Every structure is written in structure tokens, then in C-alpha cells.
Image (tube, rainbow, N blue to C red):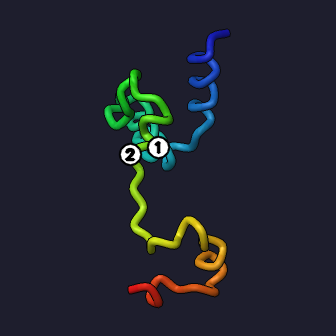
Amino acid sequence: MSTKDLIQQEIDKVEEARLPALYELVKRFAKPKTDQPPASETLMDRLQKIRISAPPDFSVNHEQYASGAKSFDDVR
């Protein structure tokens, strides 16, 4: 039995009132994904695009900022 047949069997069990919601889900699932990065773009390429706005000592004192011992407001 194919996967489509198995899916159809499960769909046949869904009550009529829930079919519109299932239909919307299937439509979204079947829609091609256009928001994915190009295949040539690697994870590292994407990570390199991340920019963080932080105080100059953030890399050294990140634990103090995370714990609240230091505040971003203290630096500005």
C-alpha cells in the first residue's frame, strides 16, 4: 500500500466538520517553499549574516549580562 493510500485512509476517518482545517493544512504543505535559502548557501554562510548589537565588553562579560549582574542600560 502506498503512502498516499495510507494518507487517504486516515483522511476518510476525519469528521466532516474538521475537513476545512485539514484542507488548509494540506494546501500549505503542498505549496512550494520559496523562503528557503539557495541550495548553495551553507549554514555557515547564514550564520555569518547574523549581527548582534551589544556593548563593547559583551563578549567578555556575557555571563554577567545574562544573569542580570550587568545591564545594557548601564553602558549606554
Q: Residues within 10 Å of mark 1 (few under 14, many from 20)?
A: few
Quarter of the image where the N terminus is located: top right
Task: Please determine whether, in this image, residue 40 is positioned above or below residue 64.
Answer: above
Where residue 69 sits: x, y (%)?
Answer: 63, 87
Residue situated in front as seen by the camera: 27 or 73? 73
| Horizontal and vertical percent position of residue 59 | 55, 65
Q: Is residue 19 above or below residue 74?
A: above
At x 40%, y 28%, the residue is: 41
Question: Mark 2 packing: few (<14 Cα in 10 Å), some, or many (20+)?
Answer: few
Q: Which residue appears at 39% of the width and 56% of the height?
A: 51
Q: Could you tell me residue 60's position as x and y percent?
A: 59, 68
Place residue 31 in its image quadrant.
top left
In the rendered image of this protein, does residue 25 appear above or below residue 53?
above
Residue at screen point 50% across, 34% down: 43
| View extreme (left): residue | 34
- Judging by the rendered image, the residue that carries numbered circle 2 is 49
Tally of marks: 2
Provide the residue designation for mark 1: 47
Q: Is residue 74 above or below residue 40?
A: below
Point out the residue furthest to the top here: 1
Q: What's the CA distance linking mark 2 and mark 1?
A: 5 Å
Check whether the beta carbons of the residues at disc 2 and disc 1 lie within 8 A of each other: yes
Amino acid tagged 2 = Lys
The picture places residue 28, in percent across and down from the top left corner, at 39, 38
What's the residue type where badge 1 is placed?
Leu
